[in-house]
Image: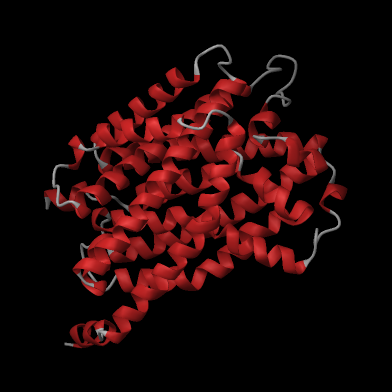
């Protein structure tokens, strides 16, 4: 009974999901999308969500066959000890590289817009230290804090987009197909990485109260993120037009030029506080999940002792690139690989479950 009370409910799960995936609208992702397909960049989240929907649906159906088992446990069960461990290691490495470059991106944002005189390494170290401390508290505490923050994150993000509408021009979204349908579809495949966080979140399925809440929470978050990313990119296009391709962080550029009248001319500090809190949550969850992955691969149960060491490693990896240009180039390589890799793994797991007769066994158990 105590264990049941400590499990995450749908509110905490949805909050974590939105804070993790929705944060992409506040970093350099919109700029990367625009560089690929220009005016049609707002379509990429919708098309990528459609492409990833079937593999992700199959993955969820497969994982929900096994109660209280996370992604890595199911991978090893279906693919065997050796192949399964290799696949788990690949996922862990991709996730580790991703968090290293993403945390460095957020560090660059903080230094560029808010603390230009503070050394990059100091900001980076503080970010990782706070996230490591939060991750050591456990997923239940993270879920509770996420639920407290999510309302403010969504409301203030919507306010920022609405306030910028007065300076926007709807004509900037034309020609609506940008460079053409073929290029849009090609970039939509690369845009699968927009939903990679949902793949990683399957690691915390055992901590969620019921399978019904997993299914419901997953699809609520999935639809919300698709809508949020698409609308955010469309607003950036209408506001910045062709200059969006040269703006590294459009959200933070946007909030520097909005105001709430003569009494509050500069409100970016309010948005910054909410944004940095959501960033802490995002990378805290990443650290916790990566700690779970590492512990599963190397059979370590007390993962809270791993988290500070992993945070230090990610800090060192993220500090290697000397400029934001190198970070952006490195992220492009990861983005190109992560979406297709996670999609293929999802389909392979479903096929393995079908060939092993797992769905038939589950149906027989339910009919008894």
Where's residue 163, x and y in %?
A: 72, 34
Where's residue 176, x and y in %?
A: 82, 59
Colouring chosen for the image of the structure: secondary structure
Q: Is residue 358 left or right of residue 336?
A: left
Vertical side of 247 occupied by 57: above or below:
below
In this view, the residue in front, 363 or 25, is: 25
Where's residue 133, x and y in %?
A: 28, 29
Q: Is residue 317 left or right of residue 165?
A: left
Vertical side of 169 occupied by 223: above or below:
below
Q: Is residue 312 left or right of residue 1?
A: right
Residue 36 seen by the camera: yes
Vertical side of 286 occupied by 199: above or below:
below
Where's residue 149, x and y in %?
A: 44, 35
Residue farthest along the top direction in this orientation: 117
Q: Residue at x 25, y 62 (%)?
A: 85
Q: Residue at x 38, y 30 (%)?
A: 316
Q: Residue at x 56, y 69 (%)?
A: 51
Q: Is residue 141 left or right of residue 47?
A: left
Residue 74 seen by the camera: no
Where's the C terminus, which quadrant?
bottom left
Q: Quadrant of residue 345 in the image?
A: bottom left
Total residue callouts? 0
In this view, the residue in front, 173 or 6, is: 173
Q: Residue at x 69, y 59 (%)?
A: 43
Vertical side of 283 occupied by 216: above or below:
below
């Amino acid at each position: 009974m105590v264990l049941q009370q400590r499990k995450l409910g749908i509110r905490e799960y949805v909050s974590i999901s939105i804070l993790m995936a929705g944060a992409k609208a506040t970093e350099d992702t919109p700029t990367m999308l625009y560089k690929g397909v220009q005016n049609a960049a707002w379509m990429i989240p919708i098309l990528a969500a459609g492409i990833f929907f079937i593999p992700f649906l199959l993955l969820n159906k497969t994982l929900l066959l096994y109660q209280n088992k996370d992604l890595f446990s199911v991978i090893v069960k279906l693919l065997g000890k050796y192949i399964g461990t290799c696949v788990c290691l690949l996922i862990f490495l991709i996730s580790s590289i991703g968090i290293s470059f993403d945390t460095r991106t957020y560090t660059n944002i903080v230094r560029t817009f808010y603390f230009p005189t503070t050394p990059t390494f100091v900001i980076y170290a503080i970010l990782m230290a706070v996230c490591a401390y939060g991750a050591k508290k456990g997923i239940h505490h993270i879920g509770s804090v996420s639920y407290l923050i999510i309302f403010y994150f969504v409301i203030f993000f919507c306010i920022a987009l609405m306030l910028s509408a007065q300076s926007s021009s709807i004509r900037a979204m034309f020609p609506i197909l940008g460079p053409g349908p073929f290029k849009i579809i090609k970039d939509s495949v690369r845009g699968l990485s927009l939903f990679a966080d949902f793949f990683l979140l399957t690691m915390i399925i055992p901590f969620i109260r019921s399978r019904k809440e997993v299914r419901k929470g997953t699809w609520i978050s999935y639809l919300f993120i698709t809508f949020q990313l698409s609308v955010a990119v469309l607003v950036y296009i209408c506001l910045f037009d062709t200059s969006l391709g040269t703006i590294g962080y459009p959200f933070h550029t946007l909030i520097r030029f909005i105001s709430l009248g003569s009494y509050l001319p500069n409100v970016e500090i309010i948005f910054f506080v909410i944004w940095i809190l959501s960033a802490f949550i995002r990378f805290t969850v990443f650290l916790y999940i990566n700690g779970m992955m590492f512990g599963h691969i190397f059979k370590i149960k007390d993962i809270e002792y791993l988290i500070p060491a992993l945070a230090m490693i990610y800090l060192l990896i993220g500090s290697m690139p000397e400029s934001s240009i190198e970070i952006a180039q490195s992220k492009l390589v990861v983005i190109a690989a992560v979406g297709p890799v996670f999609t293929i793994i999802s389909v392979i797991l479903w096929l393995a479950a079908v060939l092993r007769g797992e769905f038939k066994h589950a149906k027989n158990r339910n009919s008894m």
